[in-house]
Image (cartoon, rainbow, N blue to C red):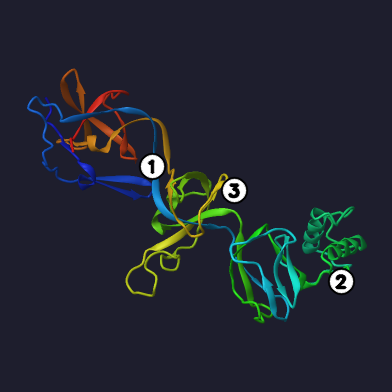
């Protein structure tokens, strides 16, 4: 009979490190700790060789938030007379704030309101305006694919102005509209009623209304998260929600610059981090206060239909390499194996005529 190997017990004896996408397993001297085999050569306990999917997933801490934070600045001079409340959601044509009693309304679009719009103007901003007028029911007959401000556009603008009891000029001043990609949530007010924000001075900080999660990864481990990877988020209250990775930051910064621990300007080494953003499959169903802590389970790489054993079943064989102790018919034998993926406390194994359902020795802890 071959000499028995030594169990590699837990993380004390097995060091797993990610290195270039692979795993390194280092053997340390085994410890007794009452884990000896029985006098008949059988291990103190056994576990099953399983066939199935194995994932190298991990869990990280994140923060529940909202997408697309940006600041809205005043376009003209005056006094702030009203602003949407913190936490409120503003939809198309809704009031964001008022200067000198004149409302600045939200319209949907990606091009900012950088100029007044009037008859004869052309551009993507004109298209955006026309699409909004049509969506609001004021642009009957308008061709929203045409970027020209026509007489028909002016008539639609007058109908919009009339609906809000504004002077019917047929032109849109720069301070009348703020364009954003969709509904906006007011995160905070940057100016108080009575202030004179003036051009370029922030009035509100807003975000999108869809929930997202942000978390930080060490730059060295950024490769473990890829755009499109599926994740599960544990939300406040213990409920779970499925989602996927929307983006992985391409620029690394010290963790204190990413909002992680270590902020405050202290010295010492700081690990470079990248920011990862998760979007939900059903964002409307996600509940929880802004900036709530959450945990994110990353799927990582998955191997399908592989044989695996508990990591604790691994032996350091006296002749080198690794093996498991197969228990059959009241007898135990050491079997050399090749190691594959590690995940969730198990390790992929091949070789040694291992089969699903076999029992392998494990230390009794």
Q: In which quadrant will I find the C terminus?
A: top left
Query: What residue is shown with label 1?
Result: 56
Residue 137: name its quadrant.
Answer: bottom right
* First-in-chain label (1 vs 3): 1
Viewed as shown, does residue 228 lie left or right of 270? right
- In whole angstroms, how far apart are the C-alphas of marks 3 and 2? 38 Å
- In whole angstroms, how far apart are the C-alphas of marks 1 and 3? 30 Å
Query: Where residue 260 sits in the image (x, y, percent)?
Result: 41, 64
Q: Which mark is residue 167?
A: 2
Viewed as shown, does residue 109 lie left or right of 278? right
**Image point (59%, 54%), residue name:** 210
Q: Which of 157 and 315 is in front in this view?
A: 157
Query: Where residue 83 sits in the image (x, y, percent)?
Result: 66, 70
Query: Where residue 191 sits in the image (x, y, percent)?
Result: 61, 76
Badge nearest the viewer, 1 or 2: 2
Secondary structure beneath dot 1 equals loop
Viewed as shown, does residue 97 lie left or right of 121? left
Are discs 1 and 2 less than 8 Å apart at CB?
no
Mark 1 crowdedness (10 Å alpha carbons): few <14, some 14-19, many ≥20: some
**Image point (19%, 30%), residue name:** 45
Q: In which quadrant will I find the N terminus?
A: top left
Q: Which mark is residue 328?
A: none
Mark 3 crowdedness (10 Å alpha carbons): few <14, some 14-19, many ≥20: few
Viewed as shown, does residue 4 lie left or right of 230? left
Q: Which mark is residue 284?
A: 3
**Image point (14%, 26%), residue name:** 42
Q: Which residue lies furthest to the left in this view?
A: 39
- In whole angstroms, how far apart are the C-alphas of marks 1 and 2? 63 Å
Are discs 3 and 2 less than 8 Å apart at CB?
no
* First-in-chain label (1 vs 2): 1
**Image point (14%, 36%), residue name:** 318
Query: Where residue 168 sits in the image (x, y, percent)?
Result: 88, 69
């Amino acid at each position: 009979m071959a000499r028995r190997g030594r169990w590699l017990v837990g993380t004390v004896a097995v060091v797993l490190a990610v290195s270039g996408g692979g795993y390194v397993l280092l053997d340390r001297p085994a410890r007794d700790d009452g884990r000896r085999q029985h006098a008949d050569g059988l291990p103190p306990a056994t576990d099953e060789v399983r066939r199935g999917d194995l994932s190298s997933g991990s869990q990280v801490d994140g923060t529940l938030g909202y997408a697309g934070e940006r600041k809205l600045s005043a376009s003209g001079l005056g006094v702030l007379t009203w602003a949407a409340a913190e936490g409120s959601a503003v939809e198309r044509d809704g009031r964001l704030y008022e200067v000198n009693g004149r409302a600045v309304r939200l319209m949907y679009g990606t091009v900012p309101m950088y100029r007044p719009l009037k008859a004869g103007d052309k551009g993507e901003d004109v298209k955006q305006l026309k699409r909004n007028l049509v969506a609001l029911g004021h642009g009957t007959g308008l061709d929203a694919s045409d970027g020209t401000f026509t007489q028909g556009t002016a008539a639609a603008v007058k109908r919009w102005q009339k609906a809000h009891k504004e002077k019917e000029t047929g032109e849109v001043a720069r301070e009348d509209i703020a364009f954003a990609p969709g509904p906006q949530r007011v995160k905070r007010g940057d100016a108080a009623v009575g202030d004179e924000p003036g051009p370029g001075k922030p009035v509100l900080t807003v975000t999108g209304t869809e929930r997202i999660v942000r978390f930080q990864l060490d730059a060295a481990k950024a490769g473990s998260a890829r755009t499109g990877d599926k994740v599960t988020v544990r939300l406040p209250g213990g409920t779970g929600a499925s989602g996927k990775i929307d983006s992985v930051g391409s620029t690394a910064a010290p963790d204190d610059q990413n909002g992680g621990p270590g902020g405050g300007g202290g010295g010492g080494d700081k690990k470079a981090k990248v920011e990862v953003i998760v979007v939900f499959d059903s964002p409307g169903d996600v509940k929880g206060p802004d900036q709530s802590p959450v945990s994110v389970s990353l799927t990582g790489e998955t191997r399908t239909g592989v044989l695996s054993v508990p990591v604790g079943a691994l032996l350091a064989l006296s002749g080198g390499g690794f093996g498991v102790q197969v228990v059959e018919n009241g007898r135990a034998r050491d079997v050399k194996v090749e190691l594959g993926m590690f995940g969730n406390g198990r390790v992929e194994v091949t070789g040694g005529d291992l089969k699903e359902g076999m029992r392998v020795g494990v230390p009794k802890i």
